[in-house]
Structure formats: structure tokens, C-alpha cells
Amino acid sequence: MIKKKSERSSQKYSIVSESLRQQFIMAFALMTVIPILCVGYFLLVYLIPNTVTNENIFLVISLSLFLSLLGFTFLHKTAKAISKLRKIFEGVAKGDIMQTCEMHSGTELDDIAEYVNLILQKLRQSQQDLKQFSGQLEGKVEERTAELKKIQRDLLQSEKLAALGRFSLGITHEVKNPLGIVLGGMEFLEIKLSGADQEVKTAIEKIKEAVLRADTIIGNLLKFARPSELKTEKVKLEDLINATLSLFKYRTSSSNIEIITEFAGEDICSEVDKGQMQQVFFNILANAVDAMPNGGKITIKIHKITPLKFFVDNPRGVIEITDTGEGISKDDLPKIFEPFFTTKRDKKGTGLGLSMTNMIINNHKGNLTVESELGKGTTFKIFLPITGGTDEKNLNY
Amino acid sequence: MKKILIIDDEEDFCYFTKKSLEATGNFEVSVCNDSREAMNEVRKVRPDLVLLDILMPRKDGTAIATELKESKDTKDIPFVFLTALVSEQETEKHKNVIGEAHFVSKPVKLQELISIINKLT
């Protein structure tokens, strides 16, 4: 379609050019004939018969030829300049705006050429601006699409959790009662069979463990069903991490795991529920330890970012927890925040830890991201809204 | 020997808890499965501590606890809610009705139960 249009334009220019050529030929002919006729007429009317000599006729013809040559030179220059302009316009019509029009015809067409150059320059600038804007627009569309996708994912996740909550609330009571009976029965048997062999005692112990594990899952479901209200207060994130680490010591004391902290020089505070946020750090740290059965390094960084989102300054505190563990496969990565997804069935994982962690962070109007590479390790980033200034309130743990 | 009264509609749970506590030799355990008879049973047994379920079909544990606290002859008897519905919201809801109380979640390990009984008696 575009090609046809371009061809049509080209034809149009050719027709114009042909017509110009015809006009030039006519002008040239006239410029040759008119001087001969004028001079001839002058000689015939005023000077006949005395001056009609061979010399005079030669003079008239020479004068006529000179004038014609002068006219031809002028016309040639103009035709050449117009042809040049035509080529430029043909190029522009085909989309080539990178050309420039160099013209020294000594006619007014030189000025037109200058204007053409100016227009071409402006066109080039506009095209560049358009390209830049288009690039920015693409980036913004991608960014917004990613945000919308995340919102959609979060919504689906919340709907899933809400449905799970309603379901779990109903069954919690019904399941915990029989679990109570099984555990009570096992403890009764334990007392009654205190003289039995080790095999029986081990069997009883395993059943009790299974009951308590089921109870933990039901307990976590209950937390989903009715997440407790946030009791927030302004807390320095650094203090909260340190408090969690002091509680976490027992998990790393026997293993070959080193914990490194890199905190920002400034105080970064956030309004959080201390208990719930410690649960978040604890869950992520526990996962990191589980991912490093042969030991490794956990690095905890705290810093501040100021993303320019919709031109609104929205500073956030970031807590990065990086391990040097096994990493998470690309297939598993999108599922790790889903309830009941676990890669630790053998280690009695319930698959609720990270989904609860994500839920708690979302409840704090924050968000949780994860990056991982198999064999290299995993980084969890917790983004939290920050509150200005430092509260001198001491953390009592 | 400490006297314990279990008020719970789950008969099997009561049976095993009674048997296990009694097997330690330190407790004498009575059971009441019908919550409507709970106050009569308390007055009859005069327990050192009551283990009280919350969600029961005819009369719930909160109502019984309120009566226990409001009656002159039973107000000094300590009680522990032993329930399958223990979450922060649930405990808060019941605390709003009867004030501070002890909550133990089912299923509970025998040692934990014994330790809380000993603490309160």
C-alpha cells in the first residue's frame, strides 16, 4: 500500500518535471526566435534598405545567438537546480530524510534549498524525538504491564488464600478434636506399655510426632483463616534483624553457617508488627539454613531505595537476605509463595512458611521478591514502606 | 491427690485424658460430657481445677466459666480452657467476656497439661 502511494507520488513528480522541461524548451525556442525577430524587425523597419548588409545580418545573428546562449545558461542552471530538488523530494517521499540539499545555482532556488534543508533537519529531529518517546513509552507499557500482572497474581493469591481461609476455619475445629483424641490415646498407651520393647515405643513416638505435625499445619491454616490484626509500631529495621538473629542463634550454632550483616549507615525505620515481622525474617533465615546442609554464608543487607513510580517519591526500606545454598529451580520459583508448595517433604516442610511470609509482608503494604540460581544461592528482598526519623523507643525482647 | 474435672463433649478425648492423668498417680479425674450439668458437677466434685472445652452443643464453655466466676461457691476454682479453637482472635473474644484466662490448644501433650495444672493448683 505504502509502496503504491510512493510510486504514485514519484509519477506525479515526473509529470511535473516533464511539463517543466517542455516549458523550458519553449522558453529556449522563444529566446532564440524573439531576439532574431526583434532585431530583424528593427533593421527592416528603421534601417532598410541601407543597412541590410551581410555584416549587419551577421551581427544580428551573432547578437541573437549570444542572447540565446545567455538565456540557455540561465535556464540550464534553473533546470539543474529543480532536478536536484526533485531528487531530494523523491527521496523524502520514499522516507529518506537523512540527505541534504547542496545548491549554488545563484538563483532563488538556493534559498528554497536552504528551507528544504531546514525542514529536513526538523524532520530528523522530530523522528529522533519520536523514537526516543516511543522507547520510553514501550518501557512504561512494559513496567505497567508487569505491575498489572503482579496485581493480578496477588489478587488470585488473595482469593485463593481467602477461600483456603474459609475452608480451613470450618475444618480446624473438626480436625483438632480427633487429633486430641489420637494424641491422648497414644500418651495413654505410652504409659500402659511402658514395659514394652523399643519397637512399640518408637511406633508410638512416630504417631505422636505425626499428630503434632498435622496440628502445626492446622494451626497455620487457622492463621490464614483469620490473620491476626497488625499491632504496628515504629521500629528500626536493623534492631529488628539483630533481635531475630539473637533468637536464631540456636539454628546456626551447630552448623557451619556464617551470618554477615551489612546495614546502611543511616537509620531506616518502618511501622511494623514486631512479632509478625520477626516471623518473616525467621522463616526466610530458616529456609536459607535448610538450603545449606553443608554450611555456607547468609548475608543480610538493609538499605533504602527511592523508586520514581508515577512521578511520586516513594522511598522504601529493603532487607536483602542472601544465602549460598542449593538455589531454587526456574520451574519451582513461581510457585514458592503458593500455599502447600514445598520442596522439603522429606524434611517435614508444610509448604505454608513462605506463603505466610508473603501474606504478612503484603499486610504491611510491602512486597517480597525472590531471585535464585541453582547451585549458587537465593536472595529474598523484603520491601517495606519507611517512616521518617528514628524512634528512640527501645526494643524489648 | 489433686481433683480435676474435665467438662467436654468429646467422650474419647475425656476418656484418654482421664486415664493418662490418673496413670501418673497424682490426679483424681472426673468427667462431665453434658455441659448443662457442668455446674452441678462442679459443686458435687469440688475440683482443684476444671478443664473446660469452649465449643459444646448445649452450653458453651464461656457461659460455664462466667457462672464459675460469678458464683460465690465456685469463684475460687481455677479453670483452663482446653479447646480445639485456639487462635489469637478466639482467645481475645473469650477474654473480652470473662477477663484473663488460660488457654490450652488441643491436641495437647500430657506433660504440658500436667505442667499447667501444677502451676494453677
Image (tube, coloured by chain):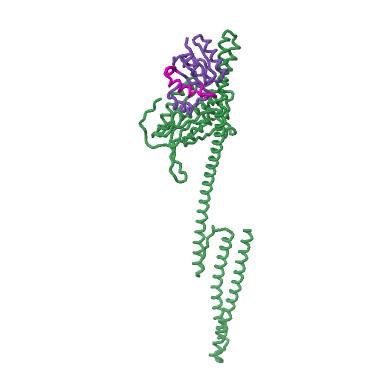
A395 left or right, relative to A359: left
Find residue A371 and report its horizontal and vertical position in percent: 53, 34
Q: Main secondary structure of the magenta part?
A: loop
User: Is residue B21 located in the magenta-colored stretch of the structure?
Assistant: no
Q: Look at the image and give the colour of chain B.
A: purple
Give the residue at the far left of this rendering: A392
Q: Can residue A176 be seen?
A: yes
Residue at image x 54%, y 87%? A42
Find residue A276 and report its horizontal and vertical position in percent: 46, 29
Where is the C terminus of chain B found, in terms of image quarters?
top left
Vertical placement of residue A109 versus B88, above or below: below
Vertical placement of residue A47 versus B100, above or below: below
Vertical placement of residue B100 versus A33, above or below: above
Name which quarter of the figure residue A146 lies in: top right
User: Is residue B59 located in the magenta-colored stretch of the structure?
Assistant: yes
Which residues are drawn in magenta?
Answer: B53-78
**B37 and A97: which is toward the camera:** B37
**A301 and A221: which is toward the camera:** A221
**A320 and B37: which is toward the camera:** B37
Circle count: 0
A271 left or right, relative to A9: left
Question: Which chain: green?
Answer: A
**A82 and A185: which is toward the camera:** A185
